[in-house]
Image (cartoon, helix red, strand yellow):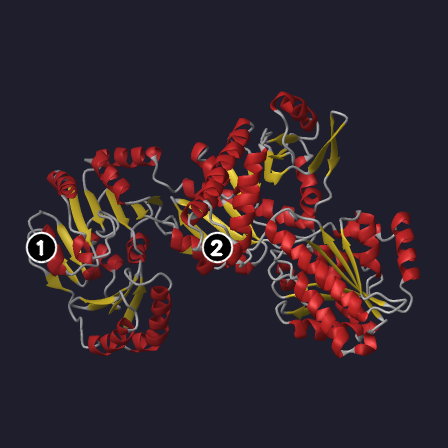
Amino acid sequence: MITNSKTIIVSNRLPVKITEENGEYILSPSEGGLATGLGSVYKRNNNIWIGWPGIEIPEHRQAEVTEKLAGLNLIPVFLSNEEISLYYEGFSNEVLWPVFHYLVTYANFEQAYWDSYKTVNEKFKAVTLNHLNSDDIIWIHDYQLLLLPCLIRSEQQEVTIGFFQHIPFPSFEIFRLIPWREQLIAGMLGADLLGFHTFDDARHFLSAASRLSSSNLSDNILIYKNRQVVVEAFPMGIDAEKFDKLTRTEKVARYTSSFKASLKNVKTILTIDRLDYSKGILQRLQAFELLLQLHPEYIGKLALYMIVVPSRDTVPRYKELKDQIDQLVGNINARFRTINWVPVHYFYRSFSVEFLSAIYSTADICLVTPMRDGMNLVSKEYVASRSNGDGVLILSEMAGASKELNEALIVNPNDIGNIMEAIVQAINMSPEEQHKRIKSMRAIVNKFNIHLWVKNFMDKLNEVKSMQESLHTKHAVAAVRAQIAADYKKAKDRYIFLDYDGTLVGFKGDIDQASPDEELYSILNKLILDPANRVILISGRRYQTLQQWFGHLNLDMIAEHGAWQKYRDAEWKALPLLTDKWKQEIRTVLDIYTDRTPGSFIEEKSYSLVWHYRKAEEGLGELRANEIINHLRMVIADKGLQMMPGNKVIEFKNIEVNKGKAAQNWLYDNDPDFILALGDDHTDEDIFKALTPEAYTIKVGSNISAARYYLKDYKEVRELLKDLC
């Protein structure tokens, strides 16, 4: 099958630089790691990359630029200087950047920033939709476009969307400080697959999303608006082969020999960063100063090469940081320098990749100590450039790369003494140990390179889409409902098993409020009026409650999961040989946990106890439920009881009590030609498993079930029953 589907990459910036020379626009490729990795994607076939070209283009020249970019498979989103100032410099870099890097005091929650952020995300949506076919794959990148997945999803329900965040995702306590937090989460949940650099970031997102949206969490999958959104960690790599090969090129060799000539008998420490307060540059300088102060034996024998790439230095906070760096470098050099030795060589500029390759391959130590970093590729570039197998990497535990490169010397970037000790350890590390550590890290950097990162993400996105599609086939949509209705119409003898809470009515915080309404009574009455129908209400509720609500209707009822049973023209009967002597002991334990869990309560039925935590704080209820399960597991087994964790409840009951057995009792000696069973809880799984494969079994609210089909909620159940009537 030949498809015309393409991959559309969307990021804030296009992977080219545009400059204007003598009235003409000149394009030059970008050197960034992302541009390298995704080059293999956007340059192939009819794939495209959508983004801002990097400068404001006057309206009368936009067509000319569009045409130039089209030759490279690039599609521009034109933004005004004001939009860049408010959306990019403003919201992206003065709200999201500081909060996501845990520097909340630097955040500036301006309404105008948020308004512009929404407007620009809408602009990206419009351009993407112009180039989108329904079977295309969209891969959106980074924090500047958090609203885009949902904006596209609202126009194109079935399209495949991946999203990758290149910076950290903060813990819920930090993230919730953003006034527009719900909208940001809803925006991200438009994607099918959300990728982060580390498992910690993925965990933080799952925590925030499950608290700030109506999604249900199961492991690393969020069920949101009846879609499954998968959240995974994909540690980003570099083009390791490129850095390894560079060290052997002629140009790099020239740079390398001139470095070595100027560095006779001096060990070098290299640091490379963009100017940013999240990079820990000042703390690193303080650690170096402390080293020279406490270990004067290294004066004249050690030099720090510090490259800081200019960034946003017109912004007051960044200008202030640059002034502090300039001052500290000046102080260290003034204090410790000798006639023929300078401790800190400080470069505030960017360098060519060949120059960086040479300095990577000659520096004895690479010091990478950000306060917080999504991944940090400098550490990986250093390792990839060490083709001689020597060198020492000192790495901050706050960088995503520390989760992979654990043969580095791992430090806390806030602990200046710790960094200083690591430098001393690095200076004195034996060549054998250096080789052992670098060899191990090089194997990781080579294997988990940028190309594997792209492949892993795209493979997972396809897998998520296949999973969603296989679940679509289980959804009882129009065609399935028509089939059920046709079989219903033909049948002469029908059994209809209906669960109550979550199936015929929605969930309420207070269990006593979920009483039947007029619409439900009307549906049940119509079903009962057909003489071919046997309607059986099968619920975990107390039999007194079912009697009060449905006693006046001519239907069968099974209460407390089968402990009590009532045929339509008979009295309630308890299952024989049941005992409730065990309840006191279990209740004593549940009372302890109820006292420790505000919002939880115990419901007592004739032959079961139920611990409810639907009103407890999110997370605390789940924690206590796990504690109860572990505490009572052995007691339950000894007493021949069953423990059933359900939707915000744990139920304890006699092992003989089971909805599946109750349903089989009803069918004993009967052979109806149509069976329909609907339920939303895992107690209903017993019914689905007990019935024959031909029976129509339908799970409500979830698609992971032994049932043949699923419906989204009680409203869809009522629609189905109305169709049958």
Residue 22 location (% of width, % of height): 77, 26
Q: Residue at coordinates 74% horizontally, 24% vertically from top-left?
A: 23
Label number found at residue 247: none
Quadrant where the image shows the C terminus: top left
Look at discs 2 and 1 and give the one toward the viewer.
Answer: 2
What's the amino acid at mark 1?
Answer: Gln
What SS does tag 2 mark? helix
Give the total of numbered labels. 2
Q: CA distance from mark 2 to mark 1?
A: 45 Å
Point out the image quarter for the N terminus: top right
- Which residue is identified by label 1? 548
Q: Secondary structure at mark 1?
A: helix
Q: Is residue 169 visible?
A: no
> Residue 311, image x and y in percent?
67, 48
Q: Is residue 596 above or below residue 369?
A: below
Instruction: Look at mark 2 in the image and give the residue it sits on.
Output: 205
Question: Which residue is rendered at x = 83% and y = 72% of the image?
Answer: 431
Q: Nearer the viewer, residue 217 or 124?
A: 124
Residue type, label 2: Phe
Q: Image check: 5 left or right of 634?
A: right
> What residue is drawn where x is 52% and y is 50%?
96
Q: Nearer the viewer, residue 651 or 373?
A: 373
* Percent of width and height locating residue 226: 38, 44
